[in-house]
Amino acid sequence: MKEVTILNEQEIFPIAVDLFESLGHTLMDRYLELNTFQLGVHLVTVDRMAEVNWDYLKHKGPTDVITFDHSEMEISDEEADLYGELFICPEIARTQAMEFSTTWQSEIVRYLAHGILHLIGFNDGTTEEKDTMKLRENHLVEQLAAEFNFQNLDLSQPS
């Protein structure tokens, strides 16, 4: 099974869900060469992200991306290379984009890559782990940017 489901639970950013889904498929299928995956991505408001962050991690306030690894749960007779869920906050992406001189569209793609890397075993707890993960994340975002126009994620802009 190779499945990506995007649930746009916010209305502030009109996002091309089908394109975001294609980015996830391409990342996992072609660039990471995963044989089976099942990923749910929730695009949420700042308030919802703060709620999830508190309810599950006991951290106050919103964050950019939260990853839930469900690989220990039995989904079928066969094991998946990746089985998880991401919560991504486009409003935080806009704030981060201004800080890093990029676009919110590039930021949510980065969050997608970051979350998927966590789900396949990358960690960012130590400086060395963080550096390794950031290099891999940057490479994946660059690969996707060479193939997709991230600006097309914004449905409010003429294409």
Image (cartoon, rainbow, N blue to C red):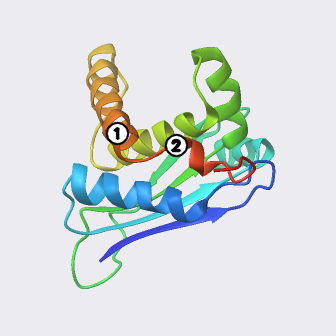
SS for callout 1 = helix
Q: Quadrant of residue 99?
A: top right
Name the residue at 48% across, 44% down.
149
**Residue farthest toward the front in the current orientation of the protein:** 159
Q: Position of residue 25 (x, y in %)?
A: 36, 61
Q: Label 1: how many residues lie within 10 Å, few (<14), some (14-19) or many (20+)?
A: few
Q: Position of residue 107 (x, y in %)?
A: 55, 34
Q: Which residue is mark 2?
A: 150
Q: Amino acid at mark 1?
A: Ala
Residue 69 visible in the picture: no
Name the residue at 51% across, 56% down.
20
Number of residue marks: 2
In the depicted view, which residue is nearer to us: 99 or 76?
99
In the depicted view, which residue is nearer to us: 107 or 53?
107
Q: Position of residue 158 (x, y in %)?
A: 70, 49
Q: Which residue is mark 1?
A: 146
Q: Label 2: how many residues lie within 10 Å, few (<14), some (14-19) or many (20+)?
A: many
In the depicted view, which residue is nearer to us: 15 or 111?
15
SS for callout 2 = helix
Instruction: Say if 156 sits above or below 105 in the image.
Output: below
Label 1 to label 2, Cα distance in Å?
A: 10 Å
Q: Quadrant of the N terminus?
A: bottom left
